[in-house]
Image (spheres, grey):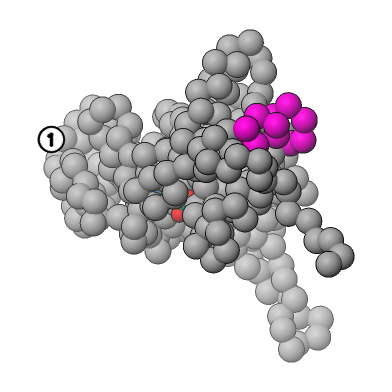
Amino acid sequence: MFLSMQGLVGAGVDEFVERAEWAQSTAHTASPSVEHDASHVPGYIPRVIDGVHSDIDILRQARTWRMHLIQSGPPGTGKTTAAQAAHGDELIIAACYDGMTTQDLVGQYLPEPGEAGVFRWVDGPLIEAMQRGRPLLLDDFGWMPPGVQATLLPALDHQRTVTVLDRPKEQTVKAAEGFSVIINVNPGVGFGITGPIRDRAAFELHVPVDLKAAEKLDVPRAFIGVAEELHNLAEAESVNGIHRWVPSMRSLLNARNLAVVFDEHFAASALVGECPAGEQRTKLQDLLVTHLELDTDVPEPLQSRSL
Ligand SMILES: Nc1ncnc2c1ncn2[C@@H]1O[C@H](COP(=O)(O)OP(=O)(O)O)[C@@H](O)[C@H]1O
Ligand SMILES: [Mg+2]
């Protein structure tokens, strides 16, 4: 373990010992390849990243080696689930939103229930993850305002510290071994990732919709066929800067459930309702008619009408 850490070791002997002890105490670092059943999410289908490593393996190794990473991709492709599958209960999740403040990350004084006028300091997810040496998932990171993103900078570089002036305990918190950050983004949504944050991430993983995984998760064959055609079309068109709607993993799983509870036509109608009206919707309807062999019964968005 000591040997394998060579070259990545930081400043002093103390730090080296601290890291080595932590690495030794975590069983998963011993094996480079991760078995399917090692996932913390039952039924999660691991993906291969560079032809060698599984996504779960990469997420765990990144944590071991103090690397922060970005997972980017459209909604519902399994970014959140991948982080949960890799880290299980250890993962601390913070959902980002456009009105997010620094307090949402570092903590704040909150009223003590049942005691009028009494406020108590509560650490935020960043401080909690740093102190306890936990992986932190910043979900929908694109929505974190750039000013708040700046709070993360010293935590994400070699300093691994953050200073919170309001905090009644230590104002400067140093990250314990095991702290690392996973940034999930949907490209083109919200404020995006600022340059200095991007610079501090060791790498970016692109996570597209995995239709093979969808098939293994029992999404009806017809819907997979429709999704395949739309994805191919979207890929061809993206070269020309056209952005085409494609069904996400979540919509496909939803279609699977609706097909079981109601029927495939109902599921198809729900999918049509998700797709932007116009040429894109007409295309989707055409594909659904073909793949579901519907003839004239074109699925329309679900709508209640008087009997
Ligand atoms: N590889 C996979 N194996 C099993 N389920 C998956 C996989 N990828 C995605 N899913 C399922 O797809 C849905 C959306 O995943 P989620 O992680 O919430 O997406 P994202 O965070 O990218 O928006 C969830 O129900 C999840 O269980
Ligand atoms: Mg998510």
- Classify the position of the C terminus by image quarter: bottom right
Read off the magenta span: 276-286
> Per the image, is 121 magenta?
no
Considering every residue shown, the one lying at the far top of the view is 240
Q: What kind of residue is marked 1?
A: Leu
Q: Quadrant of the N terminus?
A: top left
Residue at disc 1, secondary structure: helix
Q: Is residue 145 visible?
A: yes
Identified at 19% across, 55% down, the residue is 27
Predominant SS of the magenta segment: helix
Kindly identify the residue that appears in the image at 25 percent across and 55 percent down.
Answer: 38
Q: Residue furthest front?
A: 295
Q: Nearer the viewer, residue 287 or 111?
A: 287
Q: Please tell me whether residue 281 belongs to the stretch shown in magenta.
A: yes
Front residue (pair 244, 218): 218
Residue located 24% across and 51% down the image: 36
Residue 159 or 223: which is nearer the viewer? Answer: 223
Q: Residues within 10 Å of mark 1 (few under 14, many from 20)?
A: few
Residue placed furthest toward the bottom: 114
Measuring from the top left, give residue 292's x and y in whole percent.
Answer: 52, 43
Give the image location of residue 90, x and y in percent: 39, 60
Quarter of the image where one finds residue 127: bottom right
Residue beneath label 1, please? Answer: 3
Residue in the picture at 23% in, 56% down = 37
For disc 1, does the CB lie below 8 Å from ligand 1?
no
Give x and y (percent) for residue 62.
Answer: 34, 39
